[in-house]
Image (cartoon, rainbow, N blue to C red):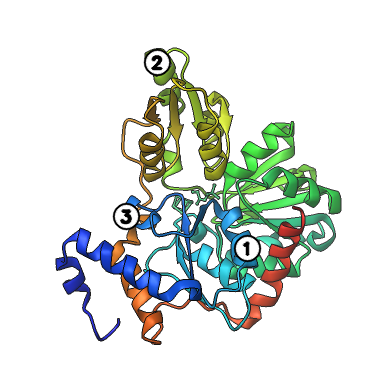
């Protein structure tokens, strides 16, 4: 914590005054700082982002910038990715270190190594299996993929990545999100008999050796706690209540929800889809609440509904508030950096390789 200002003082400051202080400090820092903002950030924060986007776009921007300081208004794995893709002279800051991702926590290095060793009892993973990690994962797992001929994917390039992975080896081990892997494979025409689920809590992931030998896609049993709240019944109800409505879903939603949707895509793809829609077209959107609320504000001519009747908000994305953003900027201005995200060199080398394999796919 910066010693010039306490968090309590900032929480006591009226919001308009605080936003003005942020704007002045941000202007003072100029090109020294780049603020990246994920689409799930709250309104008061996203307004300060120099670039907004989904995980892929923000990773590409991090790889491109030469700004000495990058403030990542997003979650921990995103800031780690930015640190891997920037030079050692650049500093990546996550305004609130508690902004994690519960899905990323569903697979750790020890569990994935145990899975790899389990597969080795049946097949030869280093010859037969390409490990693919969703970008929502720790740097250590990206490093695991780099070291074992694998790659990273995001919600916007998953199909391209799976094609690349199957082009190299017969099988794919996909972690930590079952749904992104399954939804993408289904869209590619992969039959159910080619997929198995790997439960890290059970021996051989709960599979027989025969099932492992036959499988082409091994899906880790992980999910997003926010997107799992959307149900297929919600889509049915929307269609009943609003004839002609289009259902949009993020691919972290379950397969049964995505099968009911008219369009499945990353946050950036959802934003683009709504931007390009005809006036009057109604939408029910199955992704995080802050983004859906923003789309509603930006498109008053389009009725926009949240797909679920209950609130599905990413509480960790929400942790980044104007107070934490102000402290991050102040720490740069005063040369007393808080909350720097620094991936250990041992993970950085291989993680960079698996990320670059993805970025090179275009
Ligand atoms: P996007 O890459 O589609 O923005 O997804 C990130 C994420 O965490 C969605 O829950
Ligand atoms: Fe992670 Fe889900 Fe939040 Fe995305 S919405 S950051 S996957 S917990």
Whole-percent x, y for residue 140 in the image:
60, 70
Where residue 261 sits in the image (x, y, percent)?
54, 26
- The residues tagged by marks 1 and 3 sit, at their Cα atoms, a distance apart of 38 Å
Quarter of the figure that contains the N terminus: bottom left
* Residue picked out by circle 1: 112
Task: Report if residue 111 is visible in the image.
Answer: yes
Q: Nearer the viewer, residue 87 or 310?
A: 87
Q: Position of residue 283 (x, y in %)?
A: 45, 26
Whether residues under marks 1 and 2 lie with C-beta atoms below 8 angstroms apart, the answer is no
In the rendered image, the vertical position of residue 147 relative to residue 345, given as above or below: above
Q: Quadrant of residue 26?
A: bottom left
Residue at 56% x, 77% y: name it.
Answer: 343
Residue 202 in view, yes or no: no
The answer to which of 106 and 341 lies nearer the viewer is: 341
Between discs 1 and 2, the one toward the N terminus: 1
Residue 354 appears left or right of 102: right
Q: Is residue 13 above or below residue 259?
A: below
Residue position for label 2: 242
In the picture, the disc for residue 44 is 3
Distance CA(mark 2)–CA(mark 3): 31 Å
Q: Earlier in the sequence, mark 1 or mark 3?
A: 3
- Label for residue 138? none
Asked if residue 74 lies left or right of residue 130, the reply is: left
Q: Quadrant of residue 9?
A: bottom left
> x and y percent of residue 194 in the render?
74, 38
Left or right of 336, for residue 9 = left
Q: CA distance from mark 1 to mark 2?
A: 44 Å
Depicted 232 relative to depicted 266: above or below: above
**Dot 2, crowdedness within 10 Å: few (<14), some or many (≥20)?**
few
Closer to the eye: label 2 or 3 = 3
């Amino acid at each position: 914590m910066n010693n010039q200002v306490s968090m309590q003082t900032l929480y006591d400051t009226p919001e308009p005054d605080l936003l003005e202080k942020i704007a002045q400090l941000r202007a003072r820092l100029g090109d020294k700082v780049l603020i990246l903002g994920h689409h799930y950030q709250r309104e008061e924060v996203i307004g300060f982002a120099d670039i907004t986007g989904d995980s892929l776009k923000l990773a590409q921007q991090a790889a491109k910038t030469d700004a000495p300081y990058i403030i990542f208004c997003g979650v921990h794995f995103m800031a780690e990715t930015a640190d891997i893709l920037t030079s050692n002279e650049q500093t990546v800051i996550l305004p609130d270190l508690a902004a994690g991702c519960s899905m990323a926590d569903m697979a750790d290095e020890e569990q994935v190594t145990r899975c790899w060793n389990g597969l080795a009892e049946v097949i030869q993973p280093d010859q037969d299996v390409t490990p693919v990690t969703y970008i929502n994962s720790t740097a250590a797992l990206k490093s695991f993929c780099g070291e074992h001929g694998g790659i990273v994917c995001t919600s916007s390039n998953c199909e391209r990545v799976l094609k690349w992975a199957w082009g190299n080896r017969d099988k794919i081990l996909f972690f930590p999100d079952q749904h992104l892997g399954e939804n993408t494979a289904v869209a590619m025409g992969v039959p159910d008999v080619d997929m198995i689920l790997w439960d890290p809590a059970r021996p051989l992931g709960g599979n027989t050796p025969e099932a492992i030998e036959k499988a082409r896609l091994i899906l880790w049993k992980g999910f997003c706690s926010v997107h799992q709240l959307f149900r297929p019944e919600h889509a049915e109800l929307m269609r009943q209540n609003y004839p002609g409505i289009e259902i949009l879903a993020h691919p972290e939603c379950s397969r049964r929800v995505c099968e009911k949707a008219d369009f499945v895509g990353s946050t950036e793809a959802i934003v683009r889809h709504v931007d390009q829609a005809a006036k009057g077209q109604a939408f029910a959107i199955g992704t995080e609440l802050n983004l859906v609320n923003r789309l509603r504000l930006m498109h008053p001519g389009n009725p926009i509904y949240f797909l679920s009747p209950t609130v599905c908000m990413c509480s960790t994305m929400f942790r980044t508030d104007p107070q934490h953003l102000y402290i991050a900027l102040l720490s740069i201005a005063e040369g007393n950096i808080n909350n720097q995200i620094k991936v250990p060199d041992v993970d950085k080398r291989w993680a960079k390789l698996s990320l670059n394999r993805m970025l090179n796919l275009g």
